[in-house]
Amino acid sequence: LEASGHTVVEGTDGIHGLEVIQATNDARLVICDVNMPRMDGLTMCGKLFEIRGGKSVPILILTTECSPEMKEKGKAAGVVAWITKPHTPEKLKAAVEKLTSAAA
């Protein structure tokens, strides 16, 4: 993503990710996995959604999880896009471009 001109800021786990997102007021997109240490991705997304009063930055989940139930939980937590691993760099880049241009 950096090679495509995007600035990337990383969190080491769900709790750190939430802290990083809160500290980055100009974030245009959040990409996270469902399975993360200390706080799973859906919980992190739900907390971000609550903190921002339902006006969260667009969230893309990049994960091995693909069940319809998991995706529904994601929607409830503010997730707007879902990519199942394994993925191609082109697919991720296309999704990022679409979501960041829509958020601009």
Image (tube, grey):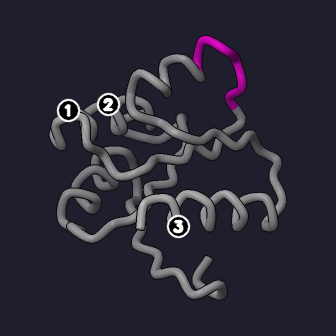
- Measured in 3D between alpha carbons, the distance from the residue under mark 1 to the one under mark 2, in whole angstroms, is 6 Å
The crowding category of the residue bearing disc 1, from other C-alpha atoms within 10 Å (few below 14, some 14 to 19, many at least 20), is some
The residue at which mark 1 appears reads as: 50
- Measured in 3D between alpha carbons, the distance from the residue under mark 3 to the one under mark 2, in whole angstroms, is 23 Å
Q: Amino acid at mark 1?
A: Glu
* Residue 44 locus on image (x, y percent): 34, 38
Image marks 1 and 2: residues in contact by CB distance under 8 Å: yes
Residue 39 placement: quadrant:
top left
* Residue 50 locus on image (x, y percent): 20, 32
In the rendered image, which quarter contains the C terminus?
bottom left
* Residue 88 locus on image (x, y percent): 84, 60
Q: Please, is residue 10 above or below residue 78 in the view?
A: below
The residue at the point 33 percent across, 66 percent down is 27
The crowding category of the residue bearing disc 3, from other C-alpha atoms within 10 Å (few below 14, some 14 to 19, many at least 20), is few
The residue at which mark 3 appears reads as: 101
The residue at the point 58 percent across, 83 percent down is 2
Element type where label 3 sits in the image: helix
Residue 4 placement: quadrant:
bottom right
The residue at which mark 2 appears reads as: 46
The residue at the point 32 percent across, 31 percent down is 46
* Region in magenta: 65-70
Element type where label 2 sits in the image: helix
The residue at the point 16 percent across, 36 percent down is 53
